[in-house]
């Protein structure tokens, strides 16, 4: 309560002192709200609805639908949308001039900003379109031969699984499967499933940092440590962890890491990031041919995409600014709070099964719920038809339920409607 009073007092004082200007009112108020958070803990701010109301105003989400499938792709805030549109208009004034001679000059500053956020060298960061492209760059670029083994999980993302299967078919590598029982809060269990699959022939392991089906966080660093003891390379799918969880990429001890920036960073749709540890760059072939030596020691070789949407790429910078404005720790605390808010209210309902941990070590924003005796698609359809709530159905290996993913613009009122819908369905 002390923190809440402190925030409201600061916000009120700043608001009364604000000058009328050409800056939109939502932007002025958001700036005031951010400044009013100084000295208040991230834990306290996680439940400060007045503050998160101002964050919500930075988005242009439809009032006609409650979007709780942000895990698929998140909307971008106004500043990112406006930057992308502005750069697109500029590109069309004289495309080859403004794209290559003006906008493309912003790539190195953007690389530096992303690297600072990721906690690594700019010489380890490449920009692309999404996690699938980044991971497949590594999967198809690894110098594997027939008989080499790769360990991966049946809960990994389908595009990733299929890329490894293609290498299996074309190159004769052997895939060794881990099948996880989830959710789990047992670090030793999760790490041991991978470690016991390693053999003298294992060359790489694929680890999904946050499993998209139910939001399970895996102990990547512990698995990586076991892999590196045996000289095994570590490929990490960070599609749902980057800008969601509060960490730096080197913390994971990964050799390779890829993420989609249009999920939790709120960058334009179709933007992604690839991290390759500096000493590994020279060993990986690029996915798209480069004019120079494909095994050169330059992260930029992974950006040989031909003509590309520079207006999308350069707008990523505004997304980084928005993320920094909120703060990584504050953002993770809020996202976890939102997930736990609705889960706490429905966990005692008859036949409800929660497929996601409520512990912040093992889960963030993504939640998954099943109703005993009912198909996930029934709940998904019920929520949309009766309450205009957009979620997504998950039926994958041993995970079955409806995935629910709020975001920083999601309000408690939105989640109260969700709880009402789940309650009505569970009791019907």
Image (cartoon, grey):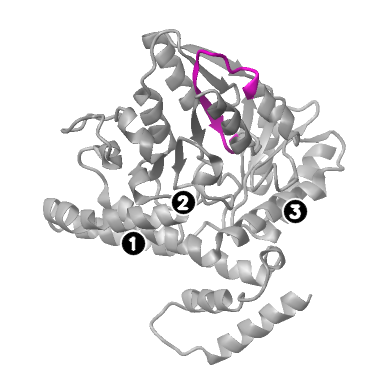
Screen quadrant of the N terminus: bottom right
Mark number, residue 83? 1
In the displayed orientation, state which residue is furthest to the front: 229
Q: In the structure shown, which secondary structural element does the residue marked by tag 2 occupy?
A: helix
**Residue 277: image x %, image y %?**
41, 39
37 lies left or right of 157: right
The residue positioned 46% from the left and 90% from the top of the image is: 19
Residue 119 higher or lower than 72, as above or below: below
Screen quadrant of the C terminus: top right
Residue 370 higher or lower than 193, as above or below: below
- Residue 315, quarter of the rendered image: bottom left
Residue closer to the observer: 392 or 363 = 363
Alpha-carbon span between mark 1 and mark 3: 34 Å
330 lies left or right of 257: right
* Mark 1 burial class by Cα count in 10 Å: few <14, some 14-19, many 20+: many
Q: Which residue is mark 3?
A: 341
The residue segment tinted magenta is 194-212
Q: Disc 2 or 1, which lies upstream in sequence? A: 1
Q: In the structure shown, which secondary structural element does the residue marked by tag 1 occupy?
A: helix
Residue 92 can be seen, yes or no: no
Mark number, residue 118? 2
- Residue 170, quarter of the rendered image: top left
């Amino acid at each position: 309560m002390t923190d809440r009073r402190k925030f409201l007092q600061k916000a009120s004082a700043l608001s009364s002192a604000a000058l009328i200007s050409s800056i939109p009112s939502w932007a002025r108020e958001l700036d005031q709200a951010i400044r009013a958070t100084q000295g208040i803990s991230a834990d306290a701010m996680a439940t400060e609805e007045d503050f998160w109301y101002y964050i919500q105003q930075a988005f242009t989400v439809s009032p006609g639908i409650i979007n709780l499938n942000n895990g698929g792709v998140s909307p971008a805030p106004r500043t990112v949308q406006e930057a992308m549109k502005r750069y697109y208009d500029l590109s069309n004034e004289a495309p080859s001039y403004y794209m290559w001679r003006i906008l493309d000059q912003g790539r190195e500053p953007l690389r530096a900003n992303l690297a600072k956020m990721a906690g690594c060298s700019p010489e380890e960061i490449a920009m692309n379109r999404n996690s699938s492209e980044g991971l497949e760059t590594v999967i198809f670029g690894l110098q594997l031969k027939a008989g080499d083994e790769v360990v991966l999980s049946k809960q990994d993302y389908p595009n990733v699984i299929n890329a490894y299967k293609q290498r299996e078919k074309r190159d004769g590598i052997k895939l060794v499967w881990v099948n996880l029982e989830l959710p789990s809060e047992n670090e030793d269990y999760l790490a041991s499933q991978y470690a016991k699959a390693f053999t003298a022939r294992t060359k790489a392991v694929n680890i999904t940092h946050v499993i998209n089906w139910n939001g399970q966080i895996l102990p990547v660093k512990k698995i990586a440590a076991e892999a590196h003891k045996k000289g095994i390379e570590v490929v990490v799918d960070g599609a749902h962890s980057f800008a969601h969880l509060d960490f730096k990429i080197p913390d994971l001890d990964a050799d390779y890491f890829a993420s989609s920036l249009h999920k939790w960073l709120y960058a334009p749709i179709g933007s992604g990031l690839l991290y390759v540890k500096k000493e590994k760059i020279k060993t990986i072939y690029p996915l798209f041919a480069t004019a120079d030596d494909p095994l050169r020691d330059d992260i930029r070789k992974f950006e040989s995409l031909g003509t590309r949407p520079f207006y999308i790429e350069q707008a990523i910078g505004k997304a980084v600014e928005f993320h920094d404005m909120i703060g990584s720790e504050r953002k993770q605390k809020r996202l976890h709070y939102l997930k736990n808010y609705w889960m706490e209210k429905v966990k005692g309902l008859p036949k409800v099964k929660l497929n996601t941990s409520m512990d912040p070590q093992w889960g963030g924003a993504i939640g998954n719920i099943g109703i005993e005796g009912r198909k996930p698609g029934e709940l998904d359809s019920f929520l949309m038809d009766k309450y205009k709530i957009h979620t997504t159905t998950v039926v994958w290996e041993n995970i079955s339920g409806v995935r629910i993913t709020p975001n920083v613009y999601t309000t408690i009122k939105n989640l109260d409607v969700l709880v009402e819908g789940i309650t009505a369905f569970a009791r019907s």
